[in-house]
Image (spheres, helix red, strand yellow):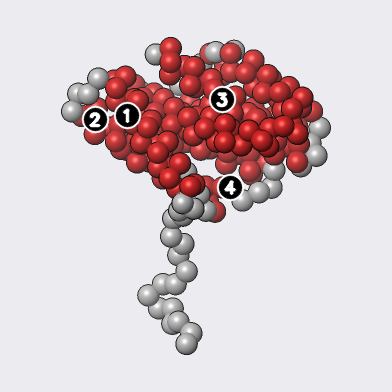
Amino acid sequence: MEVIYVLDILGTFAFAISGALVALDKKFDIFGVIIIAFVTAVGGGMLRDVLINAHPINWIGDLNYLYIIFSAVLFTFLFKSKIAHLSKTMFLFDTIGISVFTLLGLQKGLSYDLHPIIAIIMGMISAVFGGVLRDVLTAKIPLIFEKEVYASACLVGGINYLILNYFKVDENINFIISAIVIASIRAIAVKFHLELPKIKNDLFTTSKK
């Protein structure tokens, strides 16, 4: 599981940078930047652990997460003007992050004997709620509620994991395949500007001619 742990760390680093950038754009002070970076990076996993009563909480049990977040904040302060040119790299890390966080959250839910549907929800919470908390704290409409195919990719990847798990596919192979599914859906959606449909009219709404 070492490779997965490295991917987890890379995703945490990318999420922390995205949170720090938002906080800097909002003119937050250094404490505010650290808080937003922290919430973005580990907020989803922390919420998941609270909901399923898992102890220790993710970052409390592994201080490497804190070190990575502080490093990401420092990196953002030092190279903010250059990070914009790394958008493709950051997108790659972000995509890796949501893929790994989804599956780690799903696995943790299953290890606590949760119903598979609830375990998938825990995986989605792990992946996307750090960003939701970041946007709420910085007075923005959360991205997943507005336009991007984000949580949906996590949902499909989680279902894929459960199906392969049912057929007794090796855990590491299952993890890799399911992560690729999530990353591919996310990448395709962004490349082709795909969005989920919005509800505009109901059965009783008459269209204007």
- N-terminal label among 2 and 3: 3
Residue 48 screen position, x and y as percent: 48, 30
User: Disc number at residue 164?
Assistant: 2
Q: CA distance from mark 4 to mark 2?
A: 31 Å
Q: Would you identify the image quadrant in which residue 202 lies? A: bottom left
- N-terminal label among 4 and 2: 4
Disc 3 element: helix
Q: Are marks 2 and 1 in contact (CB under 8 Å)?
A: yes
The residue type indicated by label 3 comes to Thr
Disc 4 element: loop
Q: Residue furthest front?
A: 85
Crowding at label 1, few (<14), some or many (≥20) Cα neighbours within 10 Å? some
Q: Are marks 4 and 3 in contact (CB under 8 Å)?
A: no
* Residue drawn at x 61%, y 51% as measured from the top left: 141
- N-terminal label among 1 and 4: 4
Q: CA distance from mark 2 to mark 1?
A: 9 Å
- N-terminal label among 1 and 3: 3
Residue 175 screen position, x and y as percent: 34, 25
Mark in the foreground, 1 or 4 = 1
Task: Depth check: give the residue in front, 10 or 84.
Answer: 84
Q: CA distance from mark 1 to mark 4?
A: 28 Å
User: Disc number at residue 142?
Assistant: 4
Task: Depth check: give the residue in front, 179 or 54.
Answer: 179
In this rendering, the answer to whether 176 lies above or below 209 is: above
The residue type indicated by label 1 comes to Ile
Say if residue 74 shows up in the picture. Answer: yes
Residue at image mark 3: 12
Residue at image mark 1: 177
Residue 54 screen position, x and y as percent: 45, 21
The residue type indicated by label 4 comes to Pro
Disc 1 element: helix
